Image: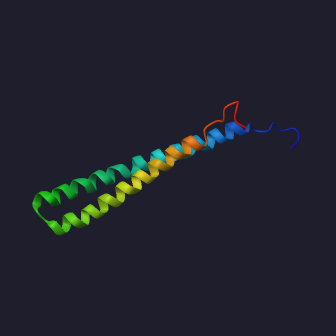
Amino acid sequence: MAGEPKADAGSIRSAIRWGLVLAAVATFGFRLPQFVRELRTWHQALRLGDESAAASRLTFVVADSVGLLIVLAFGVLIYFVLRPRGKSQP
């Protein structure tokens, strides 16, 4: 509408940036306790000498750690890609 003020493109970009970073951090924080539990069960299986259980737990630990790193990398990437442009940049 003609009478409505237009939202600043920078503020929308900043809101998207911080929303995605917050979502990445929340996802990381939500998945971290499960990763710690699986890491402890892997260590326990190693301590007990159960090689089969240790190998299967290691698979879960590696998969969860890769997932956590991807989520964290996504958050950092979004943070830097959507940062406000300086005066010299178009």
In percent of the image, x 72 and y 39: which residue is there? Answer: 9
Q: What residue appears at the point 35 percent right and 49 percent down from the top-left corner?
A: 32
Residue at 18% over, 55% down: 43
Viewer-side residue, 29 vs 74: 74
User: Residue 45 versus residue 80: which sits nearer the camera?
Assistant: 80
Establish if 27 lies above or below 80: below
Instruction: Left or right? Give the position of 77 relative to 7.
Output: left
Left or right: residue 42 compared with residue 74 = left
The answer to whether residue 27 is above or below residue 62 is above
Quarter of image, res 10: top right
Residues 34 and 54: in front is: 54
Q: Position of residue 84 (x, y in %)?
A: 64, 36
Farthest-out residue, top: 87
* Colouring method of the image: rainbow
In the orientation shown, which residue stands out farthest toward the front? 88
Tell which of 30 and 8 is nearer to you: 8
Whether residue 34 sits left or right of residue 28 in the image: it is: left
Which quadrant, please, contains the C terminus?
A: top right
Residue farthest along the right direction in this orientation: 2
Task: Please provide percent x and percent y for residue 15.
Answer: 62, 40
Count every numbered label the image shows and give the total: 0
Vertical comparison of 51 with 69: above or below: below
State which quadrant residue 46 falls in: bottom left
